[in-house]
Amino acid sequence: MEEAIVSLVVERISDLLIHEAVFLKDVKDQVESLRAELKRICAFQNRVSEIRDLAYDAEDVIDYFILKAAYQRGSHGIVKRFTSTFTKPYHLHKIGVQVKAIKTKLQNISKNLPAFEIPGDGEGSSSIFKVQQRLGRAYSHVEEEDVVSLEVSTKDVMTKLMTEEDRSHAVVSIVGMGGLGKTTLARKVYNHVDVRRHFDFLAWFSISQQCKRREVLLSVLKKVLSPSNDEREKIEKMDEIELTRTLFDALKEKRYLVVLDDIWRSEDCDILKPAFPRGRKGSKILFTTRIKNVASRADPWSTPMELPLLTDDESWNLLCKKAFPRSKMGSQCCSEEFVKLGKEMVKKCGGLPLAIVVLGGLLATEQSLAQWERVHKNIRGHLNELSHQDRKYGAVNRILVSSYNALPYPLKPCFLYLSHYPEDWEIPKKELIRLWIAEGFIPENKEFLMEDLGEKFLEELIDRSLVQVSRRDYTGTNVETCRMHDLLRDLCMKKAREEKFVEIIQQPLHELEVTLAESMLRRISIHPSKSKVYLKGEHPKLRSLLFSQNEKLIELCISKYKSFKFLRVLTLAKRGNYNKWWHVSTEIGNLRHLRYLKLYYNNKLILPRSIGRLKSLYILYIKFCYDIVIPDGVFKLERLRHIVIKVDEINPECGFRLRQGFTSKNIETLKFIVVDDKPVENNAVLRCTNIQSLEIVFTRAKYVKPTLILLTKLQRLGSVSLRFFDVSHPDLEPLSQYYHLSKLKLWGQIEDEPNPSGHVLKFLSSNIVKLTLVDCKLSQDPMAVLEKLCHLRILHLKEAYIGSKMVCSANGFPKLDYLRMFLLTELKEWKIEESAMPCL
């Protein structure tokens, strides 16, 4: 891992040499020399902690220089005057002395090391390209539900769940050691179509070692009630007694299934049971646990279902699925040497599916017999040191460690970064990749978009079975969210601590304040226990302040931004009373290294002008409810790639204007812009040719068609959301030219009186995979047009149709597998012809 950290610092120095060369002048040679020395020495694995600490010292010098340069640039405005101030001999001498001192220490470490050839220029980044090329190989992409033979177990659990016992708290439990497939089986049953039809209501919650009763009750209650925003706030203010009573009342007339995954203590069952009534006949609670006694106590009348370990044949078949891509199944898998070695290694897994798939993911990257022999020797040597009773988990741990050690160095920090998320957290792919980029794990290069390379990195971790897919997106193939098995998370956290990579701080139960100190690590993740966290203290070397938000907004407040001047990643959250503005502190503009800024607020928000000084900002994400003020300086941020403004209620006074230009040509996400003027051919937004996701608000119908015509020039545009604010009769004809569009949302009233030219939606591109229509209030049945979209997989209709009859014709919607219709209040008749929606 140390070589990965040193390589990241080398990338930072390279970045400095490119972007700040004009200011380095006389110390440029010393900085170049420091970079070369770091690259030379990082190949040696002894004295690694000293090398890592010196790499961090080098990073501090670089960041201090950039900070000073930014202040001077801001003060004097022009390079000429700046270079005459900051680059005077005294200032450059100070930097040169620090660089020389670090280099001297590195040379002292390496004096007795053998001569080592210094890699050529750019090799640090070219290794990224080598990884990318390797990531392009064909994988079998074995899905989680396919890797374990669960057919018999699935039938047994479903039979128990659908047996209509007339008693309260009927529990079906799945028992087995970690990594055996309990959660996989529970999820497979939970999503089974027959189970979904049998129960009126279903809910899932992961318990883990710390059972948070209030969070469980709140989560299930929100799902059963589907509350509005006002009702949601009321529910969140309830105490546990009120939550218990309200949930009990909400479920008592329903036949429900509640899944409680990964329970560790009988007391956790006991404190949750009062919230669950007898319900309609056949209501059930399904839970998974490693401890048989917990299952037996939960329901003495129900026999726990114990998952068996895999047989030798099942284990070998599973290993083959993972270790040999389908294209190679006929060659290597049948080779006698590979079979012998593979069967010896899989036997060490003791029939545990998690160990087998991780071993398979490791072996899939090792193509020669010598590499397989090395892996085999590694596992066998560790097992000889273990007692008999430890060997089963010892084998798993050794295989997990071997898989981590075998990761290419660019992937190691990406993997360790996952440790900052709370246990059982569903991790959004987009957020994760953008954080990786902001942290510098994925460097800029001309061949690939960083986001595309980040996607490949995640796929690699998934293919190695170090990360699991939680949900796939609307395409059905790309990842939307991912998660970590708890055994892998344990390894990830252990390695992150060992490598001084990230520090997790649990907020004290009875305190709002969390105090940071310089002695803490450079990357900190706050795990809150209250609805508010106040951050105090000073930590000038802090680079990342991580703070994961769930549905319930948790406040994170900082008293002094100047105490954290090197921050690159920052999430802030605040609650406010109705109609109250949050004036974000002007001090935020002093965080010149900031790359990732996420702001949550439940009311109105004003960004300071100083945000225009954040020249390194890569993503600006703001989630609020009502109103926002954005200074013009945001449009001049050259490195900005993603601008996301998420609102509950659209206000056309908010957002960006199409006429406003962006200095950055790398914008990929732009949500949202307001079109309240005639679009022009040379609009700056049209020069942002990398835009992939765009949200537009129209205030005049006459601007819809010309704007859509201009935007056809954006060839990478794959996702579009169009909101019509007091607009009538928008002309959507140009949408037929959006050949790359796969995701479309239309929000707002679309008049569609009978017209000789056909239905108003007839212009939709046939390539659309996901379509959402909200508040469209169509008078003509939209199904006649939509069922002809041959690639459509997901369709959401909310207040989209005000007619009384809907018809789905034979052979219509050939690919549709998800349909949600909501608030179609006038609908009286829905006719579905045979062979319509065959994939639903």
Image (tube, rainbow, N blue to C red):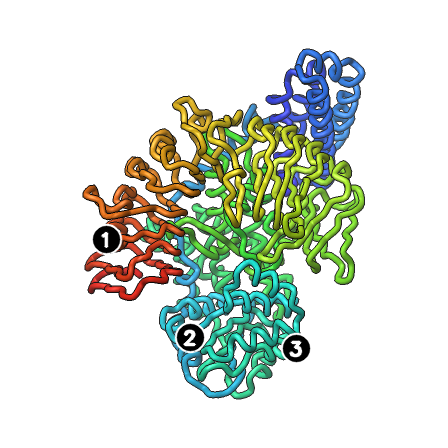
Tell me the quarter of the picture where residue 824 sits: bottom left
Q: Residue 627 appears in which quarter of the rendering?
A: top right
Q: Is residue 307 left or right of residue 751?
A: right
Residue 749 in the figure: left or right of residue 804: right
Mark on residue 199? 2
Distance between the alpha carbons at the discs numbered 2 and 3: 27 Å
Report helix, strand or loop for mark 1: helix
What's the amino acid at mark 1? Answer: Ala
Towards the viewer: 705 or 499:
705
Residue 77: percent from the left, percent from the top?
A: 67, 17
| Mark 2 residue element | loop
How far across and how far down the image is residue 302, in percent?
51, 85
Q: How many numbered callouts?
A: 3
> At x 54% / y 77%, what residue is drawn?
249
Looking at numbered disc 3 in the image, what kind of residue is underneath it?
A: Glu
Disc 3 to disc 1: CB gap under 8 Å: no
Residue 267 marker: 3
**Picture disc at residue 784:** 1
User: From the image, which quarter does the N terminus lie in?
Assistant: top right
Between residues 704 and 276, which one lies in front from this camera angle? 704
